[in-house]
Amino acid sequence: MRARWLLSAVAVVCSAMTAQAANEIAADELVARVASRVEELIERNFYKPVDFPSFAGKHPTNADIDKALADLKASHTRRFMPGTLEYYEVADIYQRWLSRDLSSIFPPRGEVQYEGIGIATTVIDGKRFVTDVYDGAMAKTAGIQVGDEVLSVNSQPFDEIRSFKGGAGTIAIVTVRRAAKTQPVEIPVMVAAISPVRMFLEAVSASARIVDYAGRDIGYVRLWTVASPLTNETVETMLRSGLLSESDGLVLDLRGRWGGISSELPEMLMEDFADISFTMRNGRSFSQRETWRKPIVVLIDGGTRSANELLACAMKKRGFSLIGEKSAGAVLGGSAYVLPDDSLLMVATSMVRVDGEVLEGRGVEPDKIVSAPIPYAGGADPQLEVAMKEVSEQLSGVSSWRSSLSPEQRRCSQGSAARSN
């Protein structure tokens, strides 16, 4: 009986080991297929010929694939893994390129959606801090602030996706620390189902406001991204006839995490159209202003990238002041592809120039550098404060609100910067 039991136990162990070995072989084969597909897409679509390493006959790891992509030193060239916040955001922003595959990676209808509270975070010195709180999102309403150190959600370690999975319509207890070495604070936040591009567009609308600053009505709007086909229409409506139309000047906030679609940049901010006037028989007249003819100060930082960098550069060339920190220098055209393991590959497919100037790897330089440290910021925004003061001084005549230099004389970048994906 004992021998029979031992033989049975050995058989179970051998079976488990065989299954594990089979799983490892299958995983290795999947990574090899991913590597082969990555190599094919880079060779076929990358914006310039490159000597991309061949993985044929090798046993590459995911780390090998990621390193090969990083070695290209190009923005818009990166792999995004399922289960991460960036995965959902990239899938939604690039959905027109992924349309045939969306139903397979987001069954059954192909709708890109996750559960969350409307924040983005990053790790600084081993601690995770809130970098973005989207206007109009649940986190904003609950009082979560940029600079909060996130400790846990519902007493469990924080994860941008897993912490809220399955929780739409429920309250999550987010524990944060507001200042170093202080007692944690528990903040109840409603969890919502989030479609990234829709959330970004709603955040743009929700950000718009009029600020009474030194007796002036200064408008503010933040273009979190221009990924929605409705961005242009939404912003221009606010400027032409909506909330921002009667403001004395404008702070245009281009700080963020993504760019978007260049065709959705608000055209009335970039072009100098002629004013069209109409005079009636009775002498009454009215004009149609086709562009914004008031002071604008633009906010940029290291998160300003892609299409938002194009807009920042266009504004600088038109003579408007830029405040903040150098932008990401991530200005290439890109496409996205689904890989065999359902990860996403973003590939740079075209070089982009603004009036002949290359911003990739260089970024847009602010006219006035203002830093904004994240850890324990307490929601403070020194860059915005300086921008408001600048608009006020321009309206008061203390400083000019447009440079006299021609667009050709105003370069967007003065040097080089580290490439950012």
Image: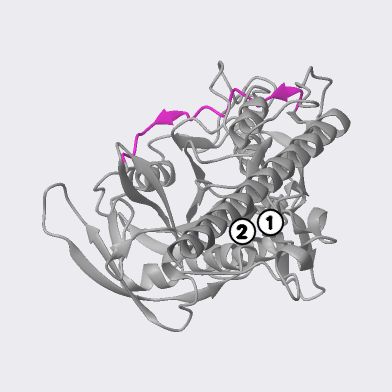
Residue at x-position 83% and y-position 36%: 41
**303, 194: nearer the viewer:** 194
**Dot 2: few (<14), some (14–19), or many (≥20) neighbours within 10 Å?**
many
- Does residue 214 appear to the left or right of 38 in the view shown? left
Residue at x-position 30% and y-position 71%: 154
When the figure is inspected, residue 247 is found, relative to residue 365, above or below; the finding is below
**205, 267: nearer the viewer:** 205
Q: Residue furthest left?
A: 182
| Residue 24 seen anywhere in this rendered image of the structure | yes
Rendered image quadrant of residue 104:
bottom right
Q: Residue furthest bottom?
A: 169
Q: Position of residue 294 (x, y in %)?
A: 55, 50
When the figure is inspected, residue 397 is found, relative to residue 60, above or below; the finding is below
Report the span colored magenta: 355-373
**283, 165: nearer the viewer:** 165
Q: Position of residue 44 (x, y in %)?
A: 88, 32
- Does residue 174 appear to the left or right of 167 in the view shown? left
Main structural element of the magenta stretch: helix, strand or loop? Answer: loop
When the figure is inspected, residue 178 is found, relative to residue 413, above or below; the finding is below
Residue at x-position 79% and y-position 25%: 57
Could you give the CA–CA distance between mark 2 and mark 1, rounded to whole angstroms? 5 Å
**Pointers 2 and 1 in contact (C-beta within 8 Å):** yes
Task: Identify residue for label 2.
Answer: 88
Residue 91 numbered mark, or none: 1
Q: Position of residue 410 (x, y in %)?
A: 61, 23
Residue at x-position 50% and y-position 38%: 401
Please state which amino acid type lies under the numbered disc 2. Tyr
Secondary structure type for disc 2: helix
Residue 358 counted in the magenta span: yes
**395, 329: nearer the viewer:** 329
Please state which amino acid type lies under the numbered disc 1. Ala
